[in-house]
Image: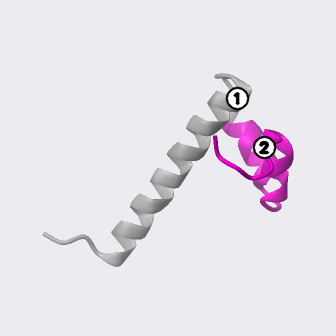
């Protein structure tokens, strides 16, 4: 059975979230409140994530 467009979009969001948290763990260490740190940094705009990771927006 083929996935609906909404199911595909949902899966993409999950994949992006997983990548972001894995990347954050590599850059910041595996912390109990890592998701909260990432959320707070990026809740207003993506520049907050740039400032958090200090990677000039380049994934390592």
The answer to whether residue 14 is left or right of residue 23 is left
| Mark 2 residue element | loop
Image point 75% across, 53% down: which residue? 57
Image point 61% across, 38% down: which residue? 23
The spot of residue 6 in percent (x, y) is 38, 73
The answer to whether residue 39 is left or right of residue 12 is right
Q: Which residues are magenta?
A: 35-60
Instruction: Look at the image and say whether residue 51 sits in the magenta stretch.
Output: yes
Residue 33 vertical position relative to residue 56 in the rendered view, above or below: above
The spot of residue 60 in percent (x, y) is 63, 40
**Mark 2–mark 1 contact, CB under 8 Å?**
no
The spot of residue 21 in percent (x, y) is 60, 39
The spot of residue 49 in percent (x, y) is 78, 49
Residue 60 vertical position relative to residue 17 in the rendered view, above or below: above
Q: Residues within 10 Å of mark 1 (few under 14, many from 20)?
A: few
Q: Which residue is mark 2?
A: 55
Q: Which mark is residue 50?
A: none
Which residue is at the front of the view, 22 or 32?
22
Quarter of the rendering containing residue 27:
top right
Q: Which residue is mark 1?
A: 33
- Mark 2 or mark 1, whichever is nearer to me: 2
Which residue is at the front of the view, 9 or 52?
52
Q: Residues within 10 Å of mark 2 (few under 14, many from 20)?
A: few
């Amino acid at each position: 059975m083929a996935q609906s467009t909404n199911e595909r979009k949902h899966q993409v969001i999950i994949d992006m979230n997983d990548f972001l948290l894995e990347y954050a763990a590599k850059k910041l260490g595996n912390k109990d409140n890592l998701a909260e740190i990432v959320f707070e940094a990026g809740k207003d705009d993506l520049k907050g994530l740039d400032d958090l990771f200090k990677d000039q927006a380049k994934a390592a």
